[in-house]
Structure formats: C-alpha cells, structure tokens
Amino acid sequence: MAKVPVIEQCVVSHGLNQEIMIEGLADYLVRNVNLVFPHRHNFYHFVLFTAGSGSHTIDFEKFEIAPWQIYFMSPGQIHTWEFEGEMQGYVVNFHKDLFKNLLLRPDYLNTLSFFSGLVRDGVFEVAENDRELVVELLERIRNFEGEKDFVTSTLLYLFNLLNQQRVPSLSVESNAYNHTLLRNFLNLIEANFKSLHLPKEYAALLYITPNHLNALCKELLGQSAGEIIRDRVILEAKRLLVIKDYSVAEIAYDLNFNDNSYFTKFFKKVVGVTPEEFRKNK
C-alpha cells in the first residue's frame, strides 16, 4: 500500500508565485489533472466553488459540493476530491509563513474559525450578501499577485470578512471570553493531544475547573471536552494509519497509549472497526 503523499507548494504552483498562488479553479485542475488521489499539503489551501458539483473529503469527512461553498485546509490535513461537470471558482495556496513578518501575533491564523483544525468549521457557504465582495477581493489578489504587501493585507481583510460570518456576535463580554477560552482550549489540544488525554489536564492549563470546560464545550460545540480531545486523537490515528510506513504498535506508542491492545480497543470503540480494518479499507 502506498503512503499518502505530501504535496509541496512548488508542485501545484509550478511557474507561479511560491509564497501565495491564486488561480481559477478550472485552470488549476487542468494543470493538476492527476491530483485526484488522497494527499496532504505543506501549505495553507482554500477553494471557493462558484459552479460545478461532486464531492471532496477532508480528514475522512465527505462533503457534497454546492455553488458558493468554500473550504479551508491547514498543513497536514488529508483530502481528495471527485468533481462532476465544469468546475468554476478560485484556488488559493499560501505558504505557512506568509504572514510571519507582518503580524504581531504569530498564532493569528489559529484564531480564525475556519483554521481551527475542526473540519466542520472549515467548510461553509459564503453568505449571499458577501459573495460579490469575496469575488472582488479574490480578483484583486489575482491581479496584484506579485505585490506581496497588497496581497497579504487584502487576504487578511478577506479572512476577517469570512470569519465574521462564522463567529456569533461577540458584543457581550461573557461571549467574547467564552469564545477566547474555547479557542485557547482547541489550540492547547493541537499542541498537546499526544501527551494530554484528560479534560482536567487542559482545564488546569486554562485555570478553570473541568466542569466549567465541559459546560463551555457543550454549549459552543455540542460535545463534551473529553469527546473533543478523543476526536483529535482518533483523527491523528487515522492520518498515521493511512501513512502506511507506521505499524499499529508504533502509532499507539506515538499517541502515548500504554499498550497496543488498549489503543486497538479505544480505536474500535470510537470508529467501529479495528485500526487494521480501517487501514485495509483506505
């Protein structure tokens, strides 16, 4: 079985700007006609569909394509697509360090809802009253692609516009606090999910009680804190399982499970099949 390859920015952006690339979806697909197998990126990536149909899968979650759907992906996520008919829209790829010297907050992208690491946050439909402006901004970026300062500032404006569609009004101070707390929790999971598996460990890092953390997660995400941590561990296990170089025992060790059998029971309870069966079906 072949491993899931990592696609480099220079491969899909051949002959184009290596820090940021924006291209019409139809032209992008002509250049990358063979890019239909499951793969990962080492860069940030988003696509806006304006016409066409089919499906795309991100980190093992499948989505049906509809006009004005947009999806965002962070480096490391696994995806593939199956398009039907004539596809129209925009593809944007940008280097993970594009904003490094521009922003005071190096973690800015992680504060955006669609780069949270939760797949369900990264796929949504652009609000009807913003569609014309979104296209206008993408066209501006495409027309001035060589002018980095203009491109990055315009891209940040686009992100802020789209993020406002995704985040409920934070005018009430308690809501702002809760959303910041949740974002910090998700960031902590991303940094520590291999070593910290318990809600109480994250609650301690956030200086709140486990009950407070659990109530917050249920209110804003509809899941318990433990389920959110568990899902991130399972996602990493799935990613490693489709990278065929790793044995199940190695994956269990990497994810800090005491033994292989306990990891297998944990995985089967959540996913419904054993790690070996999951790998065989992918």
Image (tube, helix red, strand yellow):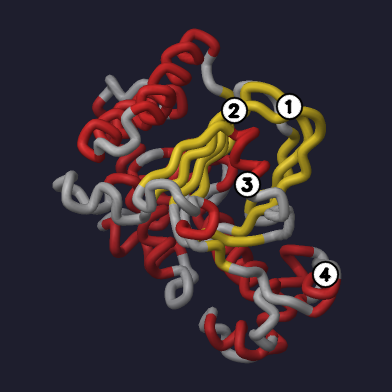
Side of 93 where 246 appears, left or right: right
Residue 273 is tagged as 4
Direction from residue 230 to residue 264 in the image, left or right: right
Q: Is residue 106 above or below residue 169?
A: below
- Residue kind at label 4, given as amino acid type: Val
Quarter of the view holding residue 251: bottom right
How far across and how far down the image is residue 99, in percent? Answer: 25, 47
Residue, x 66% and y 42% (percent of image)? 29
Asked if disc 3 and disc 4 are in contact, CB closer than 8 Å, the reply is: no
Residue reaching furthest to the top: 129
Left of 18 or right of it: where is 249?
A: right
Residue on which disc 1 sits: 52
Q: Give the alpha-carbon distance from disc 4 to disc 1, as whole Å.
A: 34 Å
Residue type (three-letter) at the residue carrying disc 1: Gly
Q: Residue at x 60, y 41 (%)?
A: 28
Q: Earlier in the sequence, mark 1 or mark 3?
A: 3
> Which dot marks residue 37?
none
Q: Is residue 175 visible?
A: no
Q: Nearer the viewer, mark 3 or mark 2?
A: 3
Residue under circle 3?
31
